[in-house]
Amino acid sequence: MIVVDPRFTRTAAVADLHCQIRAGSDIAFLGASFRYAIGNNRIAKDYLVNFTNAAFIVKPGFQLPGDTDVRFLRFMPRRKAMISPHGIMRAQEEVEELTHRIHQAEALRPLQAAGKSRVRSIAAESQLRVQLLRKHYSRYTPEMVERITGIPKEQFLKAADLYTSIRKDGDMKKASTIIYAVGWTQHSFGTQIIRTAAILQLVLGNVGRAGGGVNALRGHSTFRAPPIWPGFSTLCPAI
């Protein structure tokens, strides 16, 4: 059990590891954990290909914040919602795009049937969504985590190694969960923190599985929420 909390709580006292984070810097911690998982090949590859849109082809011209003014392409002013920010192409457009790119990446194969919008392998292709995510989070280094969150580099690496160890050597037997209270959602950017946590869980194959997910501790939630099936999961970067 890893506790990431500004306070030393009773839960932290019995945890395997307590990371004392600077309040509000959770995205840096989670983004760097994603970077660690990808960089050390601790991902659920088959899960990503078959149950998320990680292998979707994104239209050429899509720009990440590092390529613009630190906003995603087509971000609307005055904090309005983004309109089709990832430029996902329709199935037919994907077929045409793959046909055009097939000579550049042999690992990419045409879609199996009309309406299918996933390629069968995660190849080193710049317009695959998972590769755009890799590029986006490449700057989330342990040094950046230490500077922003206050968590020492060595402690972060220990936490990232422990949390992603369930996918070491491609093992898919175990699942891990992220549990949070109200603190994340009460930030003005709380939605983005939850989204980043979901991205981390999806790349590890922890959504839609027993013992996995991103779970909010709510004393007032007395109803049973509908299940979230992995087939409807999305993988998109946080702002």
Image (tube, rainbow, N blue to C red):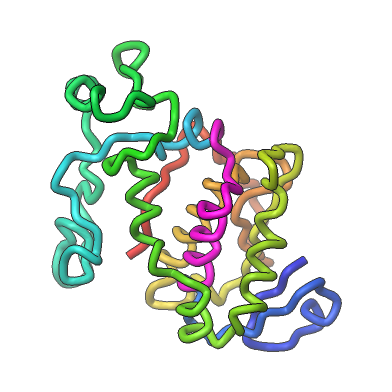
Look at the image and give the residue range highlighted in magenta: 28-47
**In the rendered image of this protein, does residue 79 appear above or below residue 45?**
below
State the residue at coordinates (62%, 74%): 156
Q: How many marks?
A: 0
Q: Quadrant of residue 94?
A: top left
Left or right: 9 in relation to 143: right
Q: Is residue 8 visible?
A: yes
Classify 225 as above or below 23: above
- Vertical position of residue 94 compared to residue 114: above or below: below
Q: Residue at x 24, y 59 (%)?
A: 64
Q: Residue at x 16, y 42 (%)?
A: 60
Whether residue 220 can be seen here = no
Q: Is residue 123 magenta?
A: no
Q: Nearer the viewer, residue 125 or 223?
A: 125
The residue lying furthest to the top in this view is: 113
User: Where is residue 149 drawn, in percent x and y?
Assistant: 52, 83
Q: Nearer the viewer, residue 128 or 41?
A: 41
Secondary structure that dominates the magenta span? helix
Question: Closest to the observer: 182 or 150?
Answer: 150
**Residue pictured at 53% horizontal, 47% vertical:** 203
Q: Quadrant of the N terminus?
A: bottom right
* 181, 26: nearer the viewer: 26
Residue 35 covered by magenta stretch: yes
Occupied quadrant, residue 11: bottom right
Q: Report the residue that reaches farthest toward the right.
A: 14
Where does the C terminus fall, quadrant-wise?
A: bottom left
Percent across and percent down for residue 221 are 63, 59
Q: Quadrant of residue 222?
A: bottom right
The location of residue 157, given as percent across then percent down, is 63, 70
Residue 137 position (above or below residue 95): below
